[in-house]
Image: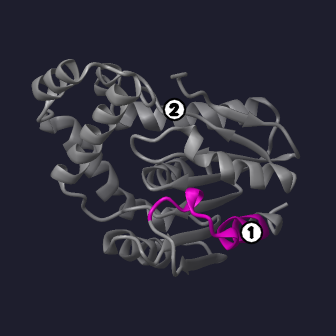
Amino acid sequence: MKSPERLFLEGGKHAVLLLHSFTGTANEMKRTAKHLHKAGFTCLAPIYAGHGQHPEKFFQTGIADWLQTAREAYLFLQQQGYEKITIVGQSLGGVIALHLADEVAPQALVTMSSPIVERELSGLESRVKAYTTYYLRMRDIPEPEAFHFVATHFPRPEHKLHALQQFILATSDLLANINCSALILYGEADAHIYQHSAQLIYDGLASTTKQLRGYKEAGHLLSLARIPEIHDDIVDFLADEL
């Protein structure tokens, strides 16, 4: 199985930085990137440090590293000469997008299914465990070896999961500082925590131009939902920022 790579599609003068979810990779943003690129945007989807790699490498990273990945990707676009840069983030990617927007003042901002209320540590660990078992299975690691690896690496130390939990919670304090145009998206079939967070993000942003949209049949990962309106809405929103 080939390791995932960042996605960079050169297009127009308005660049879009696409940030994936916790334990995801740039692959989950590929469909969104292709729609935006077809509409004339340059698209960059990085992969957070440790993501898409062996669990032991993933375990060595944390939220500070993943935020730094986003910072470096944004800087890369600036160094390439892009003056208009929009940040699009899904789930944790949207949380990182909000933290980054507080630092760099992007052209616009899109969040998809992003939580800003407390996530239980057990839920975060479940995601890490699912990532671990999926990675080992896709690499054809013998079942006894995979079982032993999981048994000896879980439960995870709480301090890194706690840091991620606190990073998510701290997002609320940043919203009043962010005044760029914003589009807040969520799935109406997603868990309540994400729907509630979408409303809180919308209400808390200082942006004078902002939109909140839900999609009746969509679950959590909107970029993968086969609902054309989602990508059409993003393209239409960003077209106003050209």
What amino acid type should be assigned to the residue bearing mark 2? Thr
**Which contiguous range is marked in magenta?**
220-237
> In the image, residue 169 lies at what x, y percent?
30, 58
Q: Work out whether 48 lies above or below 43.
A: above
Q: Are marks 2 and 1 in contact (CB under 8 Å)?
A: no
Identify the residue position indicated by label 1 in the image: 232
Q: Residue at x 44, y 63 (%)?
A: 220
Q: Could you give the CA–CA distance between mark 2 and mark 1, rounded to whole angstroms?
A: 28 Å
Residue 122: % across, % down:
16, 51
| Amino acid type assigned to the residue bearing label 1 in the image | Asp
Looking at this view, is 84 or 233 the one in front? 233
The quadrant of the picture occupied by the C terminus is bottom right
Say if 98 sits above or below 232 in the image: above
Q: Secondary structure at mark 2?
A: helix
Q: Nearer the viewer, residue 189 or 111?
A: 189
The x and y percentages for residue 230 are 65, 69
Q: Where residue 5 appears, x then y in whole percent?
A: 60, 27
Q: 202 left or right of 56?
A: right
Dot 1 crowding, Cα within 10 Å, few <14, some 14–19, many 20+: some
Q: Give the answer, above or below, for where 38 lies relative to 180.
A: above
Is residue 210 visible in the rendered image? The answer is yes
Mark found first going from the N terminus, 2 or 1: 2
Q: Nearer the viewer, mark 2 or mark 1?
A: 1
- At 35% from the left and 35% from the top, the residue drawn is 134
Query: Is residue 172 rendered to the left or right of residue 6?
Result: left
**Which residue, given by chain and number where applicable, does mark 2 sit on?**
69
